[in-house]
Image (cartoon, rainbow, N blue to C red):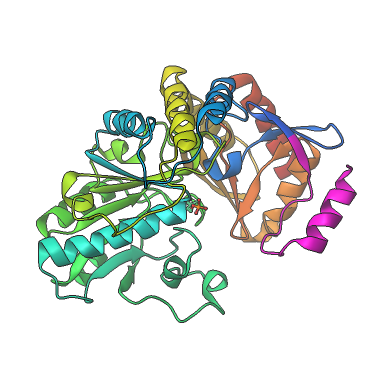
Amino acid sequence: MDAYQAIELEQTYGAHNYQPMDVVLCRGEGVWVWDVAGNKYLDCLSAYSAVNQGHCHPRIMQAMIEQSRTLTLTSRAFRNDQLGLFYRDLCRLTNSHKVLPMNSGAEAVETAIKAVRKWGYVEKGVPEDEAEIIVCGNNFHGRTITIVGFSTNENSRKGFGPFTPGFKIIPFGDVAALEQVLTPNTVGFLVEPIQGEAGVIIPPDGYLKAVRNICQENKIVLILDEIQTGLGRTGKLLAEAHEEIEADLTLIGKALSGGFYPVSAVLSNQAVLGVLQPGDHGSTFGGNPLACAVSRMALKVLVEEGMIENAADMGAYFLDGLKQVKSQKIKEVRGKGLMIGVELDTKAGGARSYCEELMTRGLLCKETHDHIIRFAPPLVIDRETIDWALEQIEAVLK
Ligand SMILES: *Cc1c(COP(=O)(O)O)cnc(C)c1O
């Protein structure tokens, strides 16, 4: 099938809820992907950080093939022999007490909201139906009704109301705003350590530490959405480690399966997930043996193959290289590990056209908002490939 036919089919039969770049991919390996015409590209998006381990990682592929020959789905009506191993590995690796497995990121967010609300009623004594959860402006936590209900992005919300009540929005990175908004009914604060979709927005130094203390002092559950920042992306296993804190609930997804399969999880201390009783929550596919086997291997290769350290080293190298690109079009370059944003000057005329031009040069990336280009290649990228990417970026932004 050629690109034209593939695009035509998508346009004809699919809902148009995305505006993809017109590159039709059919193969991937490590940091590289190929289109149907055989052109090769460096993937600098990594499926929004779901393929941190690189495309089609052979060890994860092997785990997937082997488990899919054995047992794939039982539902949680019965136990399966993979789930406990997955829990154990994940808890040991992330220093957590309990895990609740789901599928997509948005489901992990919804799960956390349910658990925190119930914790508020059972453990904190908040009157029924009055729990409040604080979130930040410009957040991205997914696409369900509840989640878009507390988005500040008009495009995400418009036409989808009425929304779930019980959320308050404060500016990101603003400690004083958090202190001011708290009430006795506040049960949780949900925040991204670095806002990815908002354009790689890094909060001031010490923000997470301060937030951690405020939550502690006021008996509020700190929920970190590490669905994008987690699993090595920022050069640490979890981004919370940059400020040496531990959230009460941590949400992970995306790279949890290395891009093979939708797997997400809520990680928690005993208290919060401990309030859930049989029947309170569930998912047909959550915790299935195929997901568990794939996920365990995805975590194993991340650690054993040094991908987290590589993200720190290569991220610093890439960021430094981008900072040296001399261009009037660049307003700011920022990032942590391999989560990098290049903010263009308003006079540069929007990021999309530069992404299109980079595509013709064999580098795939995506604008976020109108004027920011995000660079987030798989964590297995090497120096030579970054040098090549920098040449392309420099040429396009000159
Ligand atoms: C991608 C993402 C989500 C949603 O994950 P889905 O799997 O698309 O539902 C939530 N939070 C953050 C920070 C994300 O990047």
- 242 relative to 25 in the view: left or right: left
Q: Could you tell me which residue is drawn at 41 percent across and 39 percent down? A: 230
Q: Which residues are magenta?
A: 1-26
| Vertical order, 25 against 150 (above or below) | above
Q: Position of residue 32 (x, y in %)?
A: 69, 29
Give coordinates of residue 227: x percent, y percent.
43, 46
Residue 379 or residue 99, whichever sits in front: 99
Q: Is residue 377 left or right of residue 253?
A: right
Q: Is residue 46 visible?
A: yes
Q: Is residue 252 visible?
A: no
The front one of 266 and 333 is 266
In the picture, the quarter occupied by the C terminus is top right
> How many labels sit on residues?
0
The residue furthest front is 78
Quarter in which the N terminus is drawn: top right
Picture quadrant where residue 287 is located:
top left
Give left or right: position of 145 versus 390.
left
Residue lying at 64% horizontally and 28% vertically, measured from the top left? 31
Displayed quadrant of residue 239: top left
Residue 380 coordinates in the image, percent (x, y): 55, 24
Q: Give yes or no for residue 385 being in the magenta stretch.
A: no
Viewer-nearest residue: 223 or 311: 223
Horizontally, is 91 left or right of 287 in the view? left
Where residue 113 appears, as percent x and y from the top left, is 32, 61
For residue 29, above or below residue 77: above
- Residue placed most toward the observer, 203 or 330: 203
Q: Is residue 162 above or below residue 68?
A: below
Residue 5 counted in the magenta span: yes
Q: In the figure, residue 205 lies in which quadrant?
A: top left
